Structures are given as structure tokens and as C-alpha cells.
Image (spheres, rainbow, N blue to C red):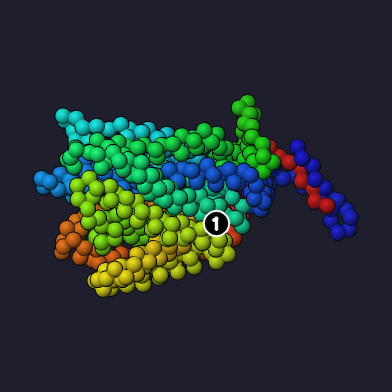
Amino acid sequence: MASYQEKSSDRDSHEKVVPANSGYVLGERRRAALAEVDNAKFSWFHAKVCIVAGVGFFTDAYDIFAINIASTMLGYVYGSGKPGALKALNKQQDLGVKVATPVGTLVGQLLFGWLADLLGRKKMYGVELMIIIIATFAQALSENAPAVHIIGVLVVWRFIMGVGIGGDYPLSAVISSEFASTKIRGRMMTAVFASQGWGNFTAALVGFIITAAYKSSILKEASITNLHSVDVMWRLLIGLGAVPGVVALYFRLTIPETPRFTMDIERNIDQAATDIQAVLAGRKSHVDDDAFIQRIEAPKASWADFREHFGKFENFKILFGTAYSWFALDIAFYGLGLNSGIILQAIGFGNPTSTGTQAIYDNLKNICVGNLILSAAGLIPGYWVSFLFIDKWGRKPIQLMGFIALTILFVILGFGYDKLISTPSSKKAFVFLYCLADFFQNFGPNTTTFVIPGEIFPTRYRSTAHGISAASGKLGAIVAQVGFSQLKDIGGPSAWVKHILEIFAFFMLTGIGSTLLLPETKNRTLEDLSNENQEGFVRGTSNKTAVITDA
């Protein structure tokens, strides 16, 4: 029992007995513990969280965007075509291998987002990475069978891989946000997400290295209809995506539970306070299984509570704003990202004039080089400029600026398409504007649509709501890929590209409207952003009492 002295102004003192299970006392303990996290200086532990979460996003991006190159390789080996001509995947096959992962990702984001709020961030972290590793390795070992074509096998494994990738979004976002201090939270989350750019770049680089390494084997092939070397190449390209996941797996399985989950969902304030002290001191947290657990009374997740919280317009508009913004952005981001090789070929960028196996080598090399240029010139710089400004300018201004810039760029690229591809010099202008669009996707809504949902919802729904927002984005990716597949054969070899770019411009315009629904999250605590009254958040616990005295 704790004793405190409370004295009046005339120096007479008296004791005031206040239950230790009162909401006021426990609320003060909760606020004090969370303040230690919110005000902590950047430490090795913060860096470790960024690295461990970032490696996962590196793996995700590699696995997603490697198919951009691998699909061309698969077409040469397992596709169809006229006698004597290079083979390619048909529309349904190309759509299947490219859309399977976004469909799986949508499922994984909803499933793991919910499970992380139900069972804990720590229990789920690493499970999704194991799914990715197994599915990636399985793709590299896939083969034709009498009952099923290899493309069908790959579609199944890429869907399963997508489920794991989907789980990475809410888990990495929520873990990094709940461990971060208020002033560096935006940069921590952006550093994690920026690993996606390096994954994209590495997929193109590995594709280029493999193509160069197998050049002599490709040129020695007896026939363009039986390419053993290319069959090995796509397996290496996809299979190597499992390596960084294996490296990161141990650290994911051993990362501690976030103190906010322990405090607000498990409602164990004592363990949360102990965990915070251990994390900030650089020690491993200790859980005493025999210790008495005093659970606080606080809002608990349930379907009725979920409806009550998001049934309020001020909360629903935030969920709608994060979900629709991500949907609109991913229509363009994945519409371009999964098909950049096709677009580069459509505008005649680096198209080979050679024939036979030489044409196969030249085309694969040009696709890899084109993707390297797009990644290095647009994607990667955009992420890191966001990193520099996200805690200074704020999330909302960056997202708003990005959508406005993308609307303008896609209008120019779409409506000025015919002129931009009419001469070799104008094609360079097209590629420059295309890179600029990549830049403003990442120095704009692609980064902020990941960051904001990881900050703006209550702890008990943070992962679930992030999963809903992210899944909306993947719905946009699916819509884009299906639309891309249906439109690309209309109007000749490249006329369809301009119509797709015009459609992208429309969705970027709508993203401006959804961004205006969102509040700014810069320099605000997660509890302040939750739109819940923190004064009465903790209502009490067991019947212990404490004698409180103020001097």
C-alpha cells in the first residue's frame, strides 16, 4: 500500500485514501509509461526495428516486381506464338501471374491485420515471412504436369506468397509506429517502407546480372522454341527472393511485443511498464509467468465497439480517407510498376532489331536496364526525399502535393502521348516524365498512405484498420492490372497506353479529395490521434487501495 501526504495551505495535513484501481491512478500510470516511449531518443533498438521491418518490405517488393521481368522469360519458355516467332504468355496467363500476388496480398492484409489486433503483433510477426519464404522457394521449383500447366502452379504459389506479403503491411507499420517516439515516427515508418524501392531496384539488377551471366547460353540455344537457359534464369530470379527473408526471420520471431498492445489490448499495465524500461535500456524484456496480473478496465475490441467507433462520422471519414487514397494511388502505382517492361516496349524504348536468340537476350537486357533506370531515377529518390521532409512538412501536405503533381503529369503523359513518342528525342522526354511520376508517387501518396493508417487509429483497431486501408490499395492494384490486361490489345501496339495514362490522371484527381478528409498526424501522439478521450480511457481494475498524500 502506497502512502502520500496531502497538506493544506495552513500546513494542516490529512490523508486521502484513493483506490489503486481507480481510473485516475491507472490512467496516470498509463500516460507516464507511454510518455517514455513518445519522448525517447533515437536508439539502436529503433534502428533494429527499422532494419528488421525494412528487410521484409525489401523482400516483398523484390518478389512482387520480379514478375515484371520473369513474365517475359516465362513467355519465351512456356508461352505460345506463331511458328518461327518469339513466344509469349497469352493475356490470361500474363494476367494470372501478375494479379495473383495482389489478390493474395489483399487477403493477407485483412487477415493478418485482424489477427495482429486479436493475438498480438509479436505472435504474427515472422509467420507472414515464413509464408513468403516457402511460397517463393516453391515457385522456383514449379514444373509442368499432365493435369496442370506450370502457369497455373505459379498462380497458386504467387497467391499464397501474396497472403504473406499482405501480412507484412499492417504488422510492420504498426510495430514501427508503436515503438517510435513522436518526433521521429514519420521517418522510422518511411525508412521501413523505403526498403520497397531497393527491393524493386534489386529485382531489376539481379535480372540484369542473370541475363548477362547466361548470355552465351542463350545465344547457343538451338531453337527459340526450346530455351533451357531461360527456364533456369526465371527460377533463379524468383528463387533468390527468399534469401533476404531467411536472413530476417530470426529477428522477426524474437522482436518484443509492443507496449501499447500489452497495455491497451492485453490490459497488463505492469508488464507494459516493465517492457518499456527494458526496451529503452537495451535489455531483453522478461515476462514472469507466475506474477499476478492486474488487468485494467479499458475499451475492448468487439464488433459492437468497432461499429460504435467507426459509426461516428469523424472516425469513419478518416478510415474512408485512408482507404480510398490508397485505392486511387495503387491503381497507378501497380498499373505502371507491374507493366513497366510492356510500356517501355510499347513506346519503342530499347526494342531490339535483332532476330532469333539474340533478340531474346537483347529484349531481356533492355527490360532490366529500363527498370533499373525507372527505379534509380524515380522510385528510390522519391522515398528518401519523403524521409527527409515527412516530420517537417507533415503527411497531409506531402500526400496532397503528390496527388496534384501526379494528376498534372498523367494528363501530360496521356493527352500528349502521341507527340511524346513521335521522335527519339521526345521519347526521352516521355521516359523523363514517367520517372518524375514515379518520384511523386513516392514523394507523395505511396509513402503517406502507408504511414498515416499506422498512426491514426486506436491501438485495438490500428492493425485492423491499416489492413483495411492497405487492402483497398490492393483492390486498386487488381483493378489496374485487369484493366491493363483488357486494354492493351485495343487500338494497336501502343495506342492503349495513352488511355490508361488518362484513366490514371482521373484517379489521381479523386485522391486529392480523399486526402482532404484526413487530419495532420505530425508531432501528435498515437493516443491523441485516436479520437478518444484519454482522461476516462482507463476505468479501473481490482480492489487494491492506496493511501495518497499530496504535499
Decide which of 67, 213 is in the foreground and name it: 213
Task: Name the image quarter holding residue 2.
Answer: top right
Q: From the image, tell me which residue sits under label 1.
A: 186
Left or right? Give the position of 15 relative to 417.
right
Q: Indicate the quadrant containing the N terminus: top left, top right, bottom left or bottom right.
A: top right
At mark 1, the secondary structure is helix
Q: Is residue 229 visible?
A: yes
Task: Name the image quarter holding residue 137.
Answer: top left
Left or right? Give the position of 546 relative to 372.
right
Give x and y (percent) for residue 384.
51, 58
Decide which of 50, 378 is in the foreground and name it: 378
Q: Is residue 436 above or below residue 337?
A: below
Task: Name the image quarter holding residue 313.
Answer: bottom left
Give x and y (percent) for residue 370.
35, 56
Q: Is residue 506 visible?
A: no
At label 1, counting other C-alpha atoms closer than 10 Å, the crowd grade (few under 14, some 14-19, many 20 or more) is many
Left or right? Give the position of 57 relative to 36.
left
Give x and y (percent) for residue 294.
62, 36
- What amino acid type is highlighted by mark number 1? Gly
Decide which of 543, 457 is in the foreground and name it: 457
Give x and y (percent) for residue 134.
37, 33
- Name the residue rendered at 31%, 53% in the picture: 366
What is the residue that sits farthest to the top in this orientation? 290
Q: Is residue 139 above or below residue 534?
A: above
Q: Is residue 98 above or below residue 240?
A: below
- Name the residue rendered at 69%, 41% in the picture: 281
